[in-house]
Image (cartoon, rainbow, N blue to C red):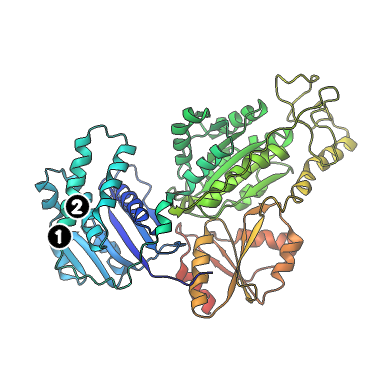
Amino acid sequence: MNQPLPQFSIRIAGNAGQGIMSSAVILSKALVKTGLYVLTSSEYPSLIRGGHNYATITFSSQKVLAPKNKLDLLLAFDQEAIEKHYKNLGKEGTALVDITNKGDQKKQKIYTISFQKITQEQGGLPIMENMAYLGTAFKILNLPFQFLNSMIANIFQEKKHKDPRIIELNQKIAKAGYDYDLSKVKNQYSQFPQSNKSAQSFTLLNGNTAIAQGLIAGKLNFYSAYPMTPASEILHYLAQEGLKKKIIVIQPEDEIASINMAIGASFAGARSATGTSGGGFSLMVEALGLAGCTETPVVIINCQRPGPSTGLPTRTEQGDLQSALYASQGEFPRIVLAPGDAEECYEYAQHALNLAEIYQTSVIMLSDKYLADNLETVGQLKNIPPIMRQNINQKNYHRYAFTQNHISPRAIPGDNVPVFTITSNEHNENGDIMEDKILRIKMMQKRMKKMQTLLKQENKIKFYKLHGNKLAKILLIGWGSTKGVILEAMRELKARNIQTQFLQFLIIEPNYWEKIQKILKKYSRLILIENNFSGQLGNLICEKIGIEIQEKILRYDGRPIEVSEILKNIKK
């Protein structure tokens, strides 16, 4: 694992409507084009209008794995931004604020600039002041203006602003901010990251967009979803790209209709998926059982947020693992995936479609608000060949035939096969309703043993990964979006001569539990790291192999775990 290189952190903060998030996207993409690795995280309240918003942009010459919360530069768009984030400034940190906030001049490390005047002199509206801030920030960072200039044009074109004068005006305001006399602002960034030319060809992706692009690469045919934060962006992206890729994208009246449509489309032969958050997934539970009994493939994406009920709609948590594992009545196989970054979101979205298709079962992919929203630098993405249905023996076709690998042949309407029945009741090989106890046992075993067949595919798909030093005595255990912060903590620990290893679960159900048991027994210290109250992965490990993990780093206030929390606990 690489030693830590200098990182730089910028926070843009202000009131909703001041262009906080659009400014963060423009600045992040411009930094990538200069050859820097970027990770951008955002925080916003669950308000229809207003409220304090902020985005933190961390960048470096090597891949950034977690946000740096000690700020080097704060772009404060209003007085509240100073009040909330001044305490986060590092020793060499600087805050820029408009000169109209006169009270701020009394604090050290704060520089007032006439952003309002800069904007007005160029003929801009107050809403365009964020461009003056961006121009000034780029100058402070000693970066060529051309990168910011071109990125402003790209972003406005993506938003379909047809009037070139709007783009030119925003560029003029940014240039005026860039040319402003900054002699009073001390250039105190001695460890500013150096550009890495190999990163200039990279791009920025968040988890939602990566999942959507992965579904497209996996030959998705049908997507239905009702908008629910933080999963809505998957729907929006696929709706925009659907016509180009010949994907049917539907927004029905609710989540119950969403999953039923996806199941129906799958029965008709489409590779289908639906997406939601925890509350929407709760509504889908009955239909999940329908898919389980009828052995109809379907992919369900759950972008988690804190519950119960509405909970914290715009915050993050990993509270739905148990729900994914046990939802719906009775027992039936399901596959639960947990990618940890944008690249894995892209890869495992493709795996999800393939696994659903091959094993004729539900595949639940767990993301969360932190992973869904975070923008991160990604390189070449991994494409997985799509697996399509096998040819059907038309003469001896039975939909639920008992087979050696426990996977029955699957026809779709229109195939030239004998008539068969699909029902949510227990059934025989042809799908006819029955209550015979011997057949019930055989049908249950057929469904459940499909997962044994999946476990023979270890060479084709990673169920878990081990990161770090093989000789370490400390094992960190986690899943999903905790990946980046754990790896970043390991970098810092290595620099202090503390060796650790990280067991990352990518497929949580099913898994090689005997192998997991052998791995855990090698270490003198096990530390579980999860964004929930009870340590749900730890509970599953205890259930499966009887090892109870005593040390736990758990956070459940709606915010992601921080590197400092891990370092503090390991020092103990």
| Marks 2,1: beta carbons within 8 A | yes
Q: Is residue 534 above or below residue 384?
A: below
Which badge, 2 or 1, comes first in the chain's sequence? 1
Q: Is residue 443 above or below residue 9?
A: above
Label total for image: 2
Left or right: where does residue 105 sit relative to residue 213? left
Nearest the eye: 506 or 230: 506
Left or right: where does residue 459 sit relative to residue 303? right
Nearest the eye: 459 or 89: 459
Residue bearing mark 1: 113
Q: Quadrant of residue 331?
A: top right
Query: Which quarter of the figure is the N terminus placed in?
Result: bottom right
What residue is drawn where x is 26% and y is 32%?
162
Query: Which secondary structure, mark 1?
Result: strand
Residue 407 image point, x, y percent:
78, 38
Query: Which secondary structure, mark 2?
Result: helix
